Image (spheres, rainbow, N blue to C red):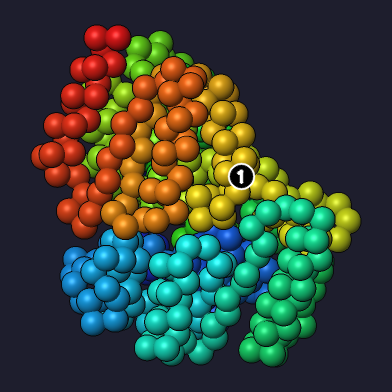
Amino acid sequence: MMGMNFRDLCERRLDIAKEQKEKNDCLVIGTLCSYVPVEILHSFGIIPLRIWGESENLHKADALLQTFICPPVRHLMALGLEGHYSFLDGIVHGYTCDAVCGLYNIWVRNLRPRFSHLISLPYMAINESSAYTMVEFGNFIKKLESFIKKKFSPESLKRSITLYNEARSLMKEVYYLKKSGLLISYADICAMNICSQTLPVEIFLPEFRKYVKTMKKEERWSRKKLKILISGSIISDTSLMTFIEEVGGDIVADDACTGLRTLLDVIPEGGDPLQSLAEYYLTRPPCASRADFPSRKAHLLEILADFDIDAVIFIHQKFCDPHLSDHPFLRKILDEAGIPHMQLELEGDGFTGRVRTRIESFFEMLERR
């Protein structure tokens, strides 16, 4: 029941953002990636809202984007053109893959938000990266100060960091509750992840505190299903996740744009909050677009061991160059570790009969092993 509540909140995320904007007379700024430092936006009293969702009219984006761009980017452009995000006061992106960077530029040029900014973080955490990131954050702060006529407050940033640290820590705890044997569907976990990035943290946190407190009291169950890790970029098709768990899998961990990668570390709350924020975004496990394969490999091996993974399912979006390029190397790691794996490459149609058949065949093979 509690999980269904988060699915409902997820469905109502845009209405909630609009209500809070009107109620509190504040700005709402959209973010295109989890590498945007939402803590900085929040410290200015701004609601950061991850732009998310699927358009029913995907082809509406064809006038501005080629059809060989990945479906999630085309979905977001279509939603923008349909006016779903017209209430936003601005948009911010953290430089990642070429497709989303292209989306950012096309969005700014055609939808003309009042505020726009692109943050370019270094791809690797070397000595020079920290100083560079501090300059990038400083430029972002100056632009925000000019836009909303309000000075940056380190104390306000500290309070924002505390809130987001708690939200991420509780979200991480849900994964480990499931690992310990609590009956939580991955579709519900996915909804919670999306809520954590699309709802004002002040609304999400109270609900989440109650949820985790309740789940800690629930009885554990004897796990008979195979422990599955899913890996990819944007993974949001709940029918696909539900089916994997129906045919014999238990999705206990992930390697995706919303999920464990963003939750494993907390931002140190002592010292210079901006410096601590820079270190967090530089050193957290990277996504495929960051081109840091040694760190990707180390993170995958750590998660495989920590969650005692039985098999991996790669869920890739068609034309997603970073993850499709990453896949052969990750597949080699799994082969060397003796962990079975399969790859699904999805387009706009998502969970089709062909995908269903492939998943069933994969689990039949696992049972024979």
Q: Residues within 10 Å of mark 1 (few under 14, many from 20)?
A: many
- Percent x, y for residue 165? 67, 49
The image quadrant of residue 66 is bottom left
- Residue depicted at 67% across the width and 62% down the height: 122
Q: Is residue 29 above or below residue 49?
A: below
- Percent x, y for residue 30? 48, 72
The residue nearer to you, when weighing 155 against 297, is 297
Pick the quarter of the image with the N terminus: top left
- Residue depicted at 18% across the width and 39% down the height: 355
Q: Is residue 236 above or below residue 229?
A: below
The residue nearer to you, when weighing 333 against 178, is 333
At label 1, which amino acid type do we have? Answer: Pro
Q: Is residue 76 above or below residue 22?
A: above
The residue nearer to you, when weighing 245 against 17, is 245
Check disc 1 and report the residue beneath it. 285
- Residue depicted at 44% across the width and 54% down the height: 322
Q: Secondary structure at mark 1?
A: loop
The residue nearer to you, when weighing 9 against 42, is 42
- Percent x, y for residue 315? 33, 42
- Residue depicted at 50% across the width and 69% down the height: 31
Pick the quarter of the image with the C terminus: top left
Q: Is residue 194 visible?
A: no
